[in-house]
Image (cartoon, coloured by chain):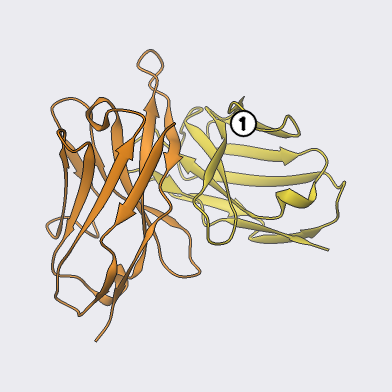
């Protein structure tokens, strides 16, 4: 199975900060990479699909980039509602795998 | 409006069985890839199983292969997960999720999720 590794595992940031989360695949996944946001007690919600396509209804402060093995999720100006855990996920192979998650906390 | 509602979770002893249901509305379950994803308490997301839209072929994670069975009832527009020989490590919230699939490009992702149902395996 393809392993997905996110960094950092957690970070503390302030409202208005620019935040970057990285995701590395154990082998090339081209751009078969999605990003999800999950808040406590809730189901995940897709933010970005195909590495850089913004899901309808998701604020434009979220953006994704990358291809091959290295990917980035950027929040350009962190808002109070963005404090959550973020997961990358590859959909190239039959077994879809997730990163371990990055928890974004309030500084 | 698209909705997915899971049910059937609960407390079960190791070696026991449970059947989870995911009743969907707002779309036809047989027209989409449908998945089960689980999340152990305080842990990350793990894909469990998929049922394809074509005739119903299926895939499973190695950790549940031979123990879990995914199925659907088209008349009830419902997805199921039959879980047998349950282990303590199967304890998790189980989500059903719809897979959006772009045939031209092959890209796919989960576009709708249920609220999850908790399965606890303990003696």
Q: Nearer the viewer, residue B8 or A51?
A: B8
Chain coloured yellow: A
Q: In the image, is A11 to the left or to the right of A107?
A: left
Tally the numbered discs: 1
Above or below: residue B106 compared with residue B58: above
User: Which residue is rendered at x = 32% and y = 52% of the image?
Assistant: B6
Spot occupied by residue A104 in the image (x, y as percentages of width and height) = 70, 57
Q: In the image, is A100 to the left or to the right of A64?
A: left
Q: Nearer the viewer, residue A66 or A10?
A: A10
Q: Name the residue under label 1.
A: A66
Other residues around mark 1 within 10 Å, as few (<14) / some (14–19) / many (≥20) = some
Chain B shade in the render: orange
Q: Nearer the viewer, residue A21 or A29?
A: A21
Give residue A57's quadrant in the image. Answer: top right
Q: In the image, is B16 to the left or to the right of B115?
A: left
Above or below: residue A40 compared with residue B1: below
* Quadrant of image for the N terminus of chain B: top left
Q: Which of A86 and B27 is in front in this view?
A: B27
**Looking at this rendering, what residue extends furthest in the top direction?**
B104
Residue B19 visible in rendering:
yes
Spot occupied by residue B70 in the image (x, y as percentages of width and height) = 18, 47
User: Which residue is rendered at x = 16% and y = 33% of the image?
Assistant: B74
Residue A1 visible in rendering:
no
The chain to which mark 1 is attached is A
Q: Disc 1 on helix, strand or loop?
A: strand
Give residue A8's quadrant in the image. Answer: bottom right
Above or below: residue B65 compared with residue B13: above
User: Which residue is rendered at x = 13% and y = 65% of the image?
Assistant: B84
User: Which residue is rendered at x = 20% and y = 49% of the image?
Assistant: B80
Spot occupied by residue A68 in the image (x, y as percentages of width and height) = 53, 31
């Amino acid at each position: 199975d393809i392993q997905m590794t996110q960094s950092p595992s957690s970070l503390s940031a302030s409202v208005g900060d620019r935040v970057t989360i990285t995701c590395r695949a154990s082998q090339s996944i081209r751009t078969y990479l999605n990003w999800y946001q999950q808040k406590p007690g809730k189901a995940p919600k897709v933010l970005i699909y195909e590495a850089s396509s913004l899901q309808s209804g998701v604020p434009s402060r979220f953006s994704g980039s990358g291809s091959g093995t290295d990917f980035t999720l950027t929040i350009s100006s962190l808002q109070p509602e963005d404090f959550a855990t973020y997961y990358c996920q590859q959909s190239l192979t039959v077994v879809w795998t997730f990163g371990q998650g990055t928890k974004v906390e309030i500084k | 409006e698209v909705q997915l509602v899971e049910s059937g979770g609960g407390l079960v002893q190791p070696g026991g069985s449970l059947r989870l249901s995911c009743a969907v509305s707002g779309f036809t379950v047989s027209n989409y890839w449908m998945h089960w994803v689980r999340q152990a308490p305080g842990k990350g997301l793990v894909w469990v199983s998929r049922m394809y839209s074509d005739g119903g072929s299926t895939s499973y994670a190695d950790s549940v292969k031979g123990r879990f069975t995914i199925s659907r009832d088209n008349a009830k527009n419902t997805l199921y997960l039959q879980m047998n020989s349950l282990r303590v490590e199967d304890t998790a919230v189980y989500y059903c999720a719809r897979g959006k699939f772009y045939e031209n490009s092959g890209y796919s992702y989960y576009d709708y999720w249920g609220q999850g149902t908790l399965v606890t395996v303990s003696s």
